[in-house]
Image (tube, rainbow, N blue to C red):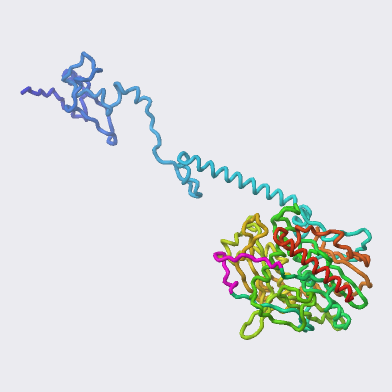
């Protein structure tokens, strides 16, 4: 066994480590080579003094003049100590902060900062989508800015696309100009009216249509053989008879009265012909007037195409809406031959002619002690409720493209019917108010509103019924903020103004650019040849030209016969 000799270890009485006295110099020479020593504090980490578990015999970098026996004390290649071969590396070592960067306290952006390199494609797509959306919003703001520069009530729509409903001739004399702001302040109460006469016959309403939903939609049928009449006031033989009997001083129809009553809500231009004959006043419409059609998206903020031949233009949609409304009012009825007849038959139908289910009520309102008003009001159906007859008005709202309204009826009618109605009230405020006013004038017990949409947004010939909802007219008027006192206040103001005019013919025109109406004095023969002035093309009649051209011809022939009979009767 090889002995192990412990060298002379002097005792240092003054402190730790080898003594500094000269007497120990000789003993220091017996110390092993390369024994590291350095002063240290209590916080320093202590290294090893000797390590016999490793060997430097295989170290190719060791010096030849070193004793292998001293390898246990050679720490020149040990990473635990500085100096030696690692001295250069240690010289370049710098302590860095290892703490993670602070996270922002607010905002979700920090969640995506560490994932920037993981989904670069997804992020690029989101950025591009945001850019496209920003461009659309910027273009829309620019369009609204340029369109709103003219000012006024709904000036953007009117200034953009609309013109006067009738050509103002230079020889016409403008008598008065009334802004809508004065209409909104008017109020007048009228007593309950009396029914002078009822004509026509009604079919019963089919209650199964109340259960129609988008999931069991029904195809809108076409009634080619039923005739619909849009006869103006002075061409009505019943009104002529009542005028000869001095039953009233003012005569009109529910369509004309509702246009006056809801004038402040209108955007499109319209006109009413006023004839003062003796002490009597007749409110008429021109042949082929816009009052015969139904406006679509009149009060909407979205622009419709200006091209008249576009299926989504204002004129094309009005024709389509009138066609839908007529067919819908006949489809929701029981066609079993059971009818409710009124006092007299339909005054406009020829003998043996098949006519639409419609009942006419000639009602009289007393405006004051000297002025009474008679109006022809219409109801489309009847229903038995508690063994009593309830009369209904039937109308249809039509959807042409969900992109314009922003609400898809097929998806929203089941779950968000209120939102659909609110959107229609915003886009068609004038049309819904006129329907409500007509139902109140006719004293209808219920007004049925149908939701009809196209089979495809680009197919304006085929439609489906998605839902039918019923409302009480007076309650619905309260929901849409339609004040009956204000309605009659407008009518009373117009009547009082016209009763001061001389005998002759006048026209009341809604200004296409401003919220106001103008009264013009026109020649006695004005509008006599109205079909020559602005005829409607055959492909723009109420019914579609593809499958119903023969019906249009039949209707035209029937109207010609009717006009000849009325003229001969006059």
Residue 532 is left or right of residue 199, and the answer is right
Q: Residue 514, image x and y in percent?
A: 81, 60
Residue 156 is left or right of residue 51, and the answer is right
Residue 344 is left or right of residue 20, and the answer is right
Can residue 191 be seen? Answer: no
Q: Is residue 144 above or below residue 331?
A: above
Residue 215 in the magenta stretch? The answer is yes
Q: Quadrant of the C terminus?
A: bottom right
| Residue positioned most to the bottom | 387
Q: Is residue 106 above or below residue 499?
A: above
| Residue positioned most to the front | 352
Q: Quadrant of the N terminus?
A: top left
Q: Residue 432, image x and y in percent?
A: 70, 68
Q: How many discs appear? A: 0
Q: Tell which of 222 and 262 is nearer to you.
A: 222
Q: Which residues are magenta?
A: 208-224
User: Which of the 4 quarters of the picture holds residue 496?
Assistant: bottom right
Which residue: 17% across, 28% down? 53
Can residue 277 be seen? Answer: yes
| Residue positioned most to the top | 65
Which residue: 24% across, 30% down? 47
Q: Residue 376, image x and y in percent?
A: 79, 76
Which residue: 77% across, 58% down? 538
Residue 149 in the magenta stretch? The answer is no
User: Which of the 4 quarters of the picture holds residue 198?
Assistant: bottom right
Q: Residue 343, image x and y in percent?
A: 76, 84
Q: Tell which of 80 and 335 is nearer to you.
A: 335
């Amino acid at each position: 066994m090889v002995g192990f000799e412990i060298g002379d270890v002097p005792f240092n009485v003054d402190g730790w480590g080898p003594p500094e006295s000269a007497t120990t110099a000789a003993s220091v020479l017996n110390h092993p080579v390369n024994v590291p020593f350095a002063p240290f504090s209590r916080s320093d980490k202590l290294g090893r003094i000797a390590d016999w578990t490793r060997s430097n015999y295989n170290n190719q970098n060791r010096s030849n003049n070193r004793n292998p026996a001293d390898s246990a004390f050679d720490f020149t290649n040990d990473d635990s100590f500085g100096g030696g071969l690692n001295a250069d590396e240690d010289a370049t070592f710098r302590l860095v902060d290892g703490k993670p960067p602070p996270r922002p306290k607010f905002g979700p952006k920090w969640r995506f900062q560490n994932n920037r390199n993981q989904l670069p494609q997804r992020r690029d797509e989101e950025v591009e989508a945001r850019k496209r959306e920003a461009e659309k919003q910027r273009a829309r703001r620019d369009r609204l800015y340029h369109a709103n520069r003219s000012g006024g009530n709904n000036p953007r729509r009117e200034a953009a696309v609309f013109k006067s409903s009738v050509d103002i001739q230079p020889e016409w004399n403008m008598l008065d100009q009334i802004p809508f702001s004065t209409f909104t302040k008017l109020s007048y109460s009228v007593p309950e009216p009396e029914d002078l006469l009822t004509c026509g016959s009604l079919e019963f309403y089919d209650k199964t249509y109340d259960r129609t939903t988008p999931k069991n939609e029904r195809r809108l049928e076409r009634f080619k053989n039923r005739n619909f009449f849009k006869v103006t006031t002075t061409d009505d033989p019943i009104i002529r008879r009542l005028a000869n009997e001095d039953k009233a001083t003012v005569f009109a129809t529910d369509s004309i009265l509702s246009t006056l009553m809801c004038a402040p809500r209108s955007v499109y231009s319209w006109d009413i012909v006023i004839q003062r004959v003796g002490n009597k006043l007749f409110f008429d419409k021109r042949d082929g007037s816009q009052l015969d059609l139904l406006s679509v998206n009149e009060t909407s903020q979205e622009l419709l195409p200006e091209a008249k031949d576009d299926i989504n233009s204002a004129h094309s949609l009005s024709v389509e809406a009138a066609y839908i409304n007529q067919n819908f009012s006949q489809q929701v009825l029981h066609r079993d031959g059971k009818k409710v007849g009124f006092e007299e038959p339909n005054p406009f139908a020829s003998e043996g002619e098949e006519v639409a289910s419609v009942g006419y009520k000639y009602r009289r309102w007393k405006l004051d002690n000297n002025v009474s008003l008679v109006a022809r009001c219409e109801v489309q159906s009847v229903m038995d409720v508690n063994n009593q007859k309830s009369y209904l008005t039937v109308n249809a709202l039509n959807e042409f493209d969900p992109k314009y309204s922003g609400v898809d009826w097929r998806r929203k009618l089941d779950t968000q019917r209120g939102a659909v109605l609110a959107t229609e009230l915003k886009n068609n405020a004038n049309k819904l108010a006129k329907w409500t006013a007509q139902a109140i004038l006719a004293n209808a017990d219920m007004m049925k509103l149908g939701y009809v949409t196209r089979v495809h947004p680009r197919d304006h010939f085929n439609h489906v019924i998605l839902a039918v909802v019923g409302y009480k007219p007076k309650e619905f008027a309260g929901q849409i903020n339609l004040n009956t006192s204000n309605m009659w206040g407008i009518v009373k103001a117009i009547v009082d103004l016209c009763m001061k005019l001389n005998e002759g013919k006048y026209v009341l025109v809604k200004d296409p650019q401003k919220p106001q109406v103008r009264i013009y004095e026109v020649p006695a023969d004005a509008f006599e040849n109205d079909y020559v002035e602005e005829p409607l093309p055959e492909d723009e009649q109420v019914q579609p030209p593809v499958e119903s051209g023969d019906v249009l011809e039949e209707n035209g022939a029937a109207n010609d016969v009717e006009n000849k009979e009325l003229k001969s009767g006059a």
